[in-house]
Image: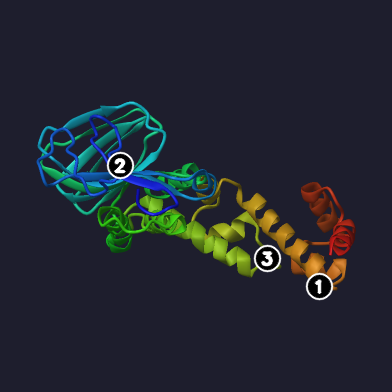
Amino acid sequence: MIGDEGKATASSDVLRQPMANHPRANALLPGEEPGDSEYYLYSPTQKMRKALYYPVRVGRGFFLKGYRLNRAPLDNFLVAYIREGSFHIKFADVEATAETGDFLIVDCYQPHQFWTDEQCRDVWLHFDGPSARHMYDYIQDRCGNVIHAVDNKRALNELLLMLDVFKRGKPLKEPTLSHHIDGILTELANAPDAGNARFENLTAVQGVLSYVAGHLEADLSLERLASVALLSKYYFAKQFKHCTGVTPHQYVLNARIERAQYLLYSTSLSITEISRSCGFRDVRTFSSAFRRALHRTPIEYRQHMNIAE
């Protein structure tokens, strides 16, 4: 055991049996050579499982040409950085190749396959957590399963820090482990390939989100937002929903209602002033939209919040 919050061990991948009190023991995987591969297991506490990202296994691997692995579901997710060579992955409807310098992210809840056509080295992490599924979907939707970032240094540093913590037998603090995983995932989410249409559409939508936040009182029609994005109206609407999960109209309406909520309980502005500040054409339209969203009129909401205080 390392530390007192969770349990970390090194283990044989064949036996799958923890070797207690031997956290620095190395283990070989099929197709690997001695001295080039190692991995460490971690048993998170129940509190960590419920609240944080947590590691399941972390390690580094060396794979000979022709290595192939077919796996049943593992009930976790995988992030790997390719240090040398290339690595092929296949699961669900995904089939992709990660090259030297790429990160890959895999849904190991699905049966999956890995194989190499050349010598390959990687550093990898199996992880999970309450928001892991949502973060995986977010990254996969933005970037795909292979992230060809120009600069992966930050994510790689976080991954190597985690490996070093286990390898050196350092005390493990669960919030810090979760922070490292979050750092890796955040960097991957921020690093779509700037050379493809997915990146360009995402950048356009992000620009529109910033514009909406600063112009809620102004005209935010579909035509106006499409012009901000420099896209046709229909193509913009399709890409906006793909990137955000809602239509432009619904996003703007939600943002206006949220601003109205804040102004109702934090200021003494009149309903008319709040309606105008949030971009509604009149009080009647504002009150109707507010009630549909929150099942209270603006006046009832303000009274309710005042009582709560």
Q: Earlier in the sequence, mark 2 or mark 3?
A: 2
Farthest residue in the front direction? 21
Q: Quadrant of residue 306?
A: bottom right
Q: Position of residue 140 (x, y in %)?
A: 41, 45
Q: Position of residue 252 (x, y in %)?
A: 66, 56
Which residue is identified by label 3?
A: 216
Q: Position of residue 92 (x, y in %)?
A: 37, 29
Which residue is identified by label 1?
A: 267
Secondary structure under the numbered disc 3 in the rendered image: loop
Q: Is residue 193 above or below residue 128?
A: below
Q: Amino acid at mark 1?
A: Thr
Q: Is residue 110 above or below residue 122?
A: above
Q: Is residue 8 left or right of residue 82?
A: right
Q: Earlier in the sequence, mark 2 or mark 1?
A: 2
Q: Earlier in the sequence, mark 1 or mark 3?
A: 3
Badge 3: residue crowd in 10 Å (few <14, some 14–19, many ≥20) = some
Q: Amino acid at mark 2?
A: Ala
Mark seen at residue 162: none
Which residue is identified by label 2?
A: 20
Q: Is residue 291 left or right of residue 204?
A: right
